[in-house]
Image: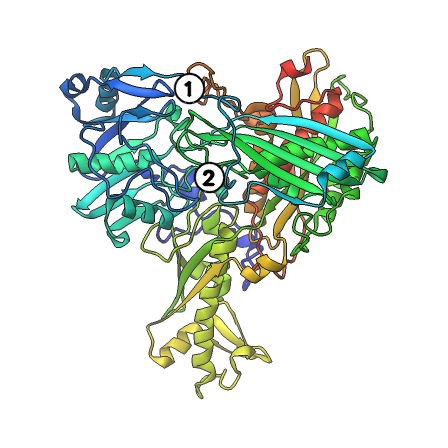
Amino acid sequence: MSDLPLASSPAHRRHGSNMGQPMTRRDGILKVTGSATYAADNHPEGMLHAVMAVSAIASGRVSALDVAAAKAHPGVVEVMTPENRPALAKDPEDRDNPFMFRLDVLQNDRVRYANQPIAVVIGETLEAAQEGVRLLSPKYESETPNVGLDGAESFVPEAVGPGAPPAASIGDFDAGYADAPTRVEATYETPPQYHNAMEPHAIVAHWTAKDRLSIDTPSQGISAALGRLSGLFGIPVENIEIRTPFLGGGFGSKGAVVSPQVLGVLAAKLVGKPVKLVTRRDQMFGPVGHRAPTRQTLKLGIGEGGLLGAISHHTKTLSSAFDEFFEGSSAASHTLYASPAIATSHEAVRANTGTPMFMRAPGEASGSIALEGAIDEAAEACGMDPLAFRLANYAEKEPISGKPFSSKRLRECYEQAAARFGWEERTLAPRSMRDEDGLLVGWGVGTATFPAVMFAAEARAVIKADGSGVMESSIEDMGQGAWTALAQIAADGLGIDIEELTFRGGESGLPDAGVAGGSGHTATAGNAIHAAGVDVVRKLAELATNDEQSPLFGAGNAGVDARDGRLYRRDDETRSESYADILARAGLSEIEGSGTGAADSAAQEHYALHAHGVVFAEVKVDPDLCQMRVSRLVGAFAAGRIINPRLVESQLFGGMIWGVSFALHEGAKVDRRSGKVMNGDLAEYHVPVNADVPSLEAILVDEEDPHVNPLGIKGVGEIGITGSAGAIANAIWHATGTRVRRFPVRIADLV
Ligand code: MOS
């Protein structure tokens, strides 16, 4: 995206401070009017259409493809199979780091999961390519697939999530559990989930020269994608252009290069023309990642006054037959509740499935739903109010590491959300509340947490002769509003009005903005952008304060403030000078600065860095039909400095709605015999629609964090999901007296 027209809200704008203002999205009007150009909307001259053929079996080999029949179709240009697929410079099964995944790009006839790409048909039209795929009539030699958590022998993975150890402990769990007067043991199951962003994975790939590649594709991490493609195709990073101006969601699945993108580039190479390849909706269930299922066993030992004396959290999960990504669900128990003894562990199996990946709040989403359920069961076992139980076990330090939190206003979250929700009216016993229509009413609570993660980013800032500013960094906006929030930071860093800012992101060739993931994009890129702006201001101040003709002469660098495109003497605000005048007198057409943002290793060493929050849920359950509805969610979140409360509220709503989905709707059904996802489309893979979305409130609790990073930003992308799913499940128990430990909760579970 270059030079987006601004659509800010002047009524909310204060001069000199854009951070903290609820501006509307800069790209909002383009999106809602259909004038935003997504990757698949690009049609370079001479472009052909590629369609993937995918495997109907989950394990075995492709024994025959009728390539001749497909090629005989008048609109089919070429069929790409393992026989003629262009060579790669690097084995697609290699991976160099935990953010890279092994690919299925027609390296052989082996099938490792259902929906694995087995051929690509390239046609003059989409319809011709689709018809060509049908004519391939694949034949298979099928083997019995390993499916689900019990389909193969289990093992302890080397790492979970992107590189965390699979087990951790403090204290003596066995002794603490054995001695506890009250014990709770519960096993929770979460299903496989698929990202299903509105915009599927897509690519328009164009080889503009033998060793030059130009592509439009949605990406949450442009520089990582550059590196991956450079390695695979054996061309320098500088020879690859990636444009990812608008994304229709990502949820983690666009954080790494996936097989369909590489197949699009290979197809373009094979035919020597630009090629578009869009992943069909049902093809999203396999080659582009998912959240693996989990089975989690929690054991809680509870002493006098409801104090936790021992917590163990064991997760069984799965990865694909050929690659490693393990959902690190047990880590949720490292942070949330104080206990002298904690033991977490993971085990896994390999299954004939596409490789799991990061999916919205990876680890914490599934882990917190089990932990919050077990904590609720512990409160029940002690006869305590579930909020009082959580407060009794409030962690003043991070339990597993013993480190102080860099900041933690979770207590204020509990207080504010409970007051807003009216929690004190809750009756303790299940099935004890009804509404005026006789429906069972249940109130539940779930604590939310997510680590404040940072990656690495760079930004370049310029003030031009007319005093206007430019900020450049390859920011990826998945729809979360990054371009808006980060433009606010840019304007403040440069000390200019946001209307005077040109903001460039969303493409390669700009300074690396890092990954839009891990809830860390605003913190990482934001700090880089702010630093770049401050660098320019520092240079301007140096010019002015050393220039005898400037009203700022002699003020010293520390003695000036920057705002509205001017520098002001701090000790005498009547003495100021515009950026344009400073540059003109120095004879400069522009002045440039740069900045970086990265995790602070000292902060990481000394502090536990997490955002916190809580969600209170109200559900209504029909006592005869057992139909469940979430009627109300009230959350409160403390996540450091909030750059744009409007967008943050929207992010939190998105997370809370995902919690509704997790609790009541979403889950892939995998057939044990075929290994296929039986509900692999948007008609049968249920996600909440508007009618399922309750009244939502998200309170933003003020929190200043002096340690996490210079701007004090923790990130809000994923935390909303971590509290709400558990809160809803706990509310269902309160409404019905039935504790459902397998998600999503179904009517049949309550009968
Ligand atoms: Mo997120 S799962 O880091 O996009």
- Name the spot of residue 227 as percent of width and height, x first: 33, 49
Q: CA distance from mark 2 to mark 1?
A: 27 Å
Q: Secondary structure at mark 2?
A: loop
Q: In terms of sequence position, does the residue under pointer 2 or pointer 1 come before the other?
A: 1
Total marks in image: 2
Which residue: 73% across, 51% down?
396
Determine whether the beta carbon of the residue marked 2 sits less than 8 angstroms from the nearest atom of ligand 1: yes
Residue found at the very far bottom of the displayed protein: 548
Q: Tell whether circle 1 marks a residue whose Cβ is less than 8 angstroms from ligand 1.
A: no
Q: Quadrant of residue 621?
A: top right
Nearest the viewer among 553 and 428 is 428
Query: Local crowd at mark 1 within 10 Å, few (<14), some, or many (≥20)?
Result: many
**For residue 145, which numbered disc appears in the image?**
1
* Residue at left offset 77%, top offset 22%: 435
Closer to the camera, 750 or 49? 750
In the image, 655: left or right of 728?
A: left
Where residue 215 appears, x then y in whole percent? Answer: 28, 43
- The answer to whether marks 2 and 1 mark residues whose Cβ atoms lie closer than 8 Å is no
**Residue identified by numbered label 2:** 252
Report the amino acid beneath label 2: Gly
Residue 337 at x, y percent in the picture: 71, 43
